[in-house]
Amino acid sequence: MTWIFFAFLTAIFRSLTDVAGKFGLKNMDEYIVAWALNFFALPILLPLLFFIEIPEITSGFWLAIFVSGTLNIATAILYLKAIKIADLSLVIPLSTFTPLFLLITSPIIVGEFPTIFGLIGIFLIVFGSYILNIKKRKDGFLAPFKALLSNKGAQIMLLVAFIWSITSNFDKIGLQHSSPVFYGIAVNVFITIGITPIVFIKSRKNLNQIPKNLKSLIPVGIFHGFMMLFHMIAISMTLVAYLISIKRTSAVISVLFGVIIFKEKGLKERILGAIIMIIGVLCITLF
């Protein structure tokens, strides 16, 4: 059961990445922080190439790298934009919508169809998102949903969750045509290379601030690098569904960080909503 240990480490470092990213966004824009997240992860990931067997690469690998890598360049920026403009404890739980969207994208891309547990999971994820804004219930039954959908950060995070439902399927294809560790490293390198010219275009006036903010930018990449490392170790020991289910507990950890570190309000309902959404994820991924 060693994989459980590494899966929980993945969740913890996912949350630490969120916190470090939000700190970095206080002084830098989302383009620079997204670049730092991937660039400063390379010293953690690239040395692994000396310790693994380089797999045989087939054609599906290149398609997966291109599609997933390109889309994840966009999600890296959008994800950080969401946590920049909204409470961490509100938007991070919405990342659990990815398994829900997978019930739509998986049948189309890889031919996988939901079961009755998948439908139960859908209900729980939607209900959990309702609980996130349950205090708005006094304004009407649908008020919590309206409050959520009117939040710009929430809108962006839901878009990210949907895009992840597409990239997850291509990541699965990439893993099948290489190996978990090699593919994980390759995707990160692709994203780093792809996001670099975007930073030079969108943030050229702020590039001189990078050296001044290394103390806040480097930890983002280091935490992300360790998250990827533990993710790849765990995925080599167990089923992807098991890992993702535990990894999504990062939503609860991030809610706690948001309340404790950033003094965000609504701890009870956001913890409860996040837990219900994670139970929904369990229903979808484990069954």
Image (cartoon, grey):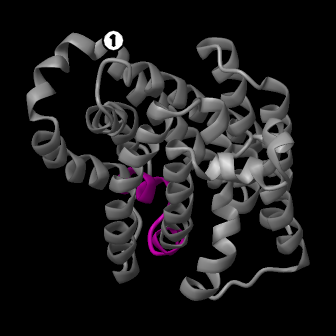
Residue at (85%, 54%) from the top-left corner? 141
Name above or below for residue 108 compared with residue 246: below
Q: Is residue 53 visible?
A: no
Tell me the kind of residue under disc 1.
Answer: Lys
Residue at (65%, 20%) from the top-left corner? 264
Residue sitting farthest toward the front: 139
Residue at (41%, 42%) from the top-left corner? 48
Name above or below for residue 267 compared with residue 226: above
Q: According to the image, label 1 marks what residue?
A: 215
Q: At which x and y percent is residue 97?
A: 67, 58
Q: Residues within 10 Å of mark 1 (few under 14, many from 20)?
A: few
**Is 203 on the left or on the right of 223, as rendered?**
left
Quadrant containing the C terminus is bottom right
Q: What kind of secondary structure does the magenta stretch mostly adopt?
A: helix
Q: At which x and y percent is residue 109?
A: 54, 84
**Is 36 on the left or on the right of 202, as rendered?**
right
Q: At which x and y percent is residue 271?
A: 81, 33
Quadrant containing the N terminus is top right
Residue 110 falls inside the magenta stretch: no
Report which quarter residue 100 is drawn in: bottom right
Q: Which residues are magenta?
A: 172-187
User: Which one is nearer the viewer's eye here, 231 or 271?
Assistant: 271
Residue 180 falls inside the magenta stretch: yes
**Is 267 on the left or on the right of 248, as rendered?**
right
Report which quarter residue 69 is drawn in: bottom left
User: Which one is nearer the viewer's eye here, 230 or 127?
Assistant: 127
Name above or below for residue 98 compared with residue 188: below
Query: Helix, strand, or loop for circle 1?
Result: helix
